Structure formats: C-alpha cells, structure tokens
Amino acid sequence: MTLKILFDQGTPVPLRAHISAHLVSTAYELGWATLKNGELLAAAENHGFDVLVTTDTNLQYQQNLTQRKIAIVVLSTTSWPRIQKNISAIVTAIEIAAPNSFHNVSII
C-alpha cells in the first residue's frame, strides 16, 4: 500500500529518496511552512495524508493527539548525517504507522 507522507519543516528532504515506494510531500512544497502544529495536522488530515514525519520532539506535549487520524513519526534530530545511519528504523516506523499512532525514532 502506498502511503501519503508529509515532511514537516526540519525533516531533511534527502530522506525522501529512501521512502520512494510512497508519495512524499513537504510542508514547504505545499505552502504550509508557516502553519503551526495544530493547523498543520488538520491540513494534513484534510488532504488525506497518512503519516506526518517531524523533528518536533515536543509535538506530543503541545497537541492533543487522541482525536487525530494521522500517524506521527518523530525523529529525535534534524542532523542528516545521523539520520542517514538510522534509515531502516525510520522506514520501519513509517511503514508500521497506523492511524492515530505516535512513534518516536531515537537517533543516536
């Protein structure tokens, strides 16, 4: 199944090449770069996105996620060199993400 994935600001765009089996858009490409978290989540859900990939580690504390349909995958860093070493864990988190789920991918 092809997932519709949204990269939040701060999510390194080169990650897109590693999830090429899915449709990936960025908040910037969609003109959503200035949307705050709640607005971004609502826009993503309204446009049929399945997964939000973000580096905002405070998102779970700032938003009530219980009523959300979208799955959220949080990367613990914006560092592309560090993210590159954890591609398989990130791809797995995206692919197992279910609606209304939250996954923290700890990147060391």
Image (cartoon, rainbow, N blue to C red):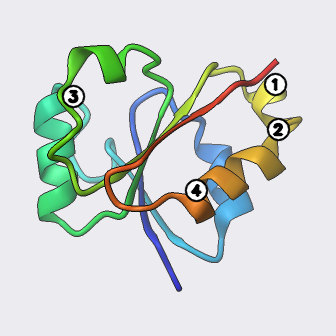
Q: Which residue is mark 2?
A: 86
Q: Give SS at disc 1.
A: helix
- Residue at image location 47% in from the left, 73% down from the top: 3
Cβ–Cβ under 8 Å for marks 1 and 2: yes
Q: Amino acid at mark 1?
A: Arg
- Residue at image location 33% in from the left, 22% down from the top: 59
- Residue at image location 48% in from the left, 26% down from the top: 10
Query: Which mark, by number, is residue 37?
Result: 3
Q: Amino acid at mark 4?
A: Ile
Measured Cα–Cα span from mark 4 to mark 2: 13 Å
Q: Give SS at disc 4.
A: helix
Left or right placement of residue 93 versus residue 51 in this view = right
Q: Which residue is mark 1?
A: 82
Left or right placement of residue 99 versus residue 20 in this view = left
Which mark is first along the chain, 3 or 2?
A: 3
Label 3 Cα crowd, 10 Å radius (few <14 / some 14-19 / many 20+): some
Q: Which residue is mark 4?
A: 94
Measured Cα–Cα span from mark 1 to mark 2: 7 Å
Which one is in front in this view, the residue at disc 1 or the one at disc 2?
2
Q: Nearer the viewer, residue 50 or 30?
A: 50
Q: Give SS at disc 2.
A: loop
